[in-house]
């Protein structure tokens, strides 16, 4: 059933306390949906998280219900988090909803859904699922959000700098999160080491300074060009940008392509899908994204997202560090898909 932010916040708190909830977070502001789900780990750091992807649910819809019914051997409580594109989780949700008592809460995160979306039509009439649409914040709300996101990562962001980041990101929460993560890494900020973000740091690391090389990297990678990817990564390495920031840009582009590809599979054309994406697709990138949609199919994108997320997890868990590791993994991916 449709829910408001207050209901969703209470549901997230309930998950942290071990209560069982099924939640669908959708809408154009995927970063906000992710931030809502991330609160579970902050409320209950010991809770185990089972991560599923759209590709996994598309290949085996029963996986979602199986994981929701499973019993953890390593933690007193756990929850299932699935990030999908479009209607990928529809069949899986239809198998989950009839289950009377689940052992683990389920959070499904996806992008914007049309009114006639099969996933939305499945979720809204069901009394045992909360569906919430995330929209980009505006004005003072956007400034407060940037300051709050910074606080979570150990950055004290003054209002004038928060406003500057809002202007740059055009109220895109995905960019808020990416930029703040970049500054936190550069300044070695953390909740235990609060650092104030100043204009000098923003000037030094502003995405504007790397925009050309970042665009070339994304273009080279999704065009499967080893030469252009290597060239742009070498220049980005010299500029001091963190590898995980580049990786997350590639993940977001892969998620966008996967979402658009799913619409094409349902019968739409590349041109209509891109035009219908609105602000998700920057006008300068329309031609490149159209080309990438011709080069990458849905299943390939699903496997690619899984691989990129695995690289990100390895970095977060401290298993591997350094720019060279990410670069070599990206080169390997290109060689596999050429």
Image: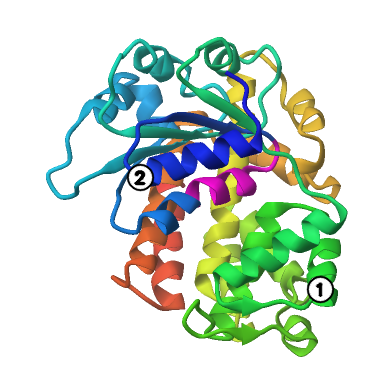
Q: Is residue 151 visible?
A: yes
**Residue at the limit of the structure toward the bottom, as seen here:** 200
**Quadrant of residue 105 within the rendered picture:** top left
Drawn side of residue 74 relative to residue 271, left or right: left
Q: In the rendering, at what x and y percent does residue 256 appear?
A: 62, 40
Is residue 29 magenta-colored? Answer: yes
Q: Looking at the image, which residue is at 46% across and 45% down? A: 13
Residue under label 2, please give it: 17
**Residue at the limit of the structure toward the left, as seen here:** 73
Residue under label 1, please give it: 159
User: In the rendered view, would you say 15 is above or below 335?
Assistant: above
Residue 272: assigned label = none
Viewer-side residue, 114 vs 55:
114
Drawn side of residue 331 relative to residue 206, left or right: left
Q: Secondary structure at mark 1?
A: helix
Q: In the rendering, at what x and y percent does residue 155 appear?
A: 62, 78
**Nearer-N-terminus badge (2/1):** 2
Total marks shown come to 2
Q: Main secondary structure of the magenta part?
A: helix
Mark 2: give few (<14), some (14-19) or many (20+) Cα within 10 Å. Answer: some
Say whether marks 2 and 1 touch (CB < 8 Å): no
Q: Looking at the image, which residue is at 38% across and 26% down? A: 57
Q: In the rendering, at what x and y percent does residue 34 appear?
A: 55, 47
Q: CA distance from mark 2 to mark 1?
A: 34 Å
Q: Secondary structure at mark 2?
A: loop
Q: Quadrant of the N terminus?
A: top right
Viewer-side residue, 267 vs 185:
185
Q: Looking at the image, which residue is at 70% across and 80% down? A: 205
User: Coloring scheme of the render?
Assistant: rainbow
Is residue 137 magenta-colored? Answer: no
**What range of the chain is rendered magenta?**
28-38
Q: Is residue 215 visible?
A: no
């Amino acid at each position: 059933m449709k829910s408001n932010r207050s209901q969703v916040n209470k549901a997230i708190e309930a998950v942290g306390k071990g209560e069982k909830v099924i939640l669908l977070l959708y809408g154009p502001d995927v970063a906000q949906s992710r931030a809502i789900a991330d609160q579970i780990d902050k409320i209950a750091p010991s809770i185990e998280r089972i991560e599923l992807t759209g590709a996994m649910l598309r290949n085996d819809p029963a996986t979602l219900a199986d994981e929701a019914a499973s019993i953890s051997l390593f933690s007193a409580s756990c929850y299932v988090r699935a990030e999908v594109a479009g209607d990928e989780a529809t069949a899986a949700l239809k198998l989950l909803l009839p289950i009377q008592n689940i052992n683990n809460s389920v959070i499904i995160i996806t992008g914007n859904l049309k009114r006639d979306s099969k996933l939305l039509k499945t979720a809204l009439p069901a009394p045992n699922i909360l569906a919430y649409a995330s929209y980009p914040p505006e004005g003072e709300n956007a400034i407060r959000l940037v300051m709050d996101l910074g606080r979570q990562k150990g950055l004290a962001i003054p209002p004038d700098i928060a406003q500057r980041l809002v202007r740059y990101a055009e109220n895109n929460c995905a960019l808020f999160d990416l930029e703040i993560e970049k500054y936190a890494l550069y300044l070695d900020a953390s909740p235990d080491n609060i650092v104030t973000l100043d204009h000098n740091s923003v000037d030094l690391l502003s995405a504007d300074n790397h925009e050309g090389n970042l665009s070339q990297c994304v273009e080279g990678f999704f065009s499967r060009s080893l030469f252009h990817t290597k060239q742009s990564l070498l220049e980005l390495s010299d500029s001091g940008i963190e590898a995980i920031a580049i990786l997350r840009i590639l993940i977001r582009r892969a998620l966008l392509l996967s979402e658009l590809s799913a619409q094409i599979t349902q019968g739409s054309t590349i041109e209509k899908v891109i035009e219908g994406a609105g602000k998700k697709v920057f006008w300068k990138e329309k031609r490149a994204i159209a080309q990438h949609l011709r080069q990458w199919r849905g299943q390939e994108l699903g496997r690619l997202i899984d691989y990129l997320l695995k690289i990100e997890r390895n970095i977060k868990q401290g298993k591997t560090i350094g720019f060279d590791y990410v670069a070599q993994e990206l080169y390997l991916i290109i060689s596999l898909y050429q």
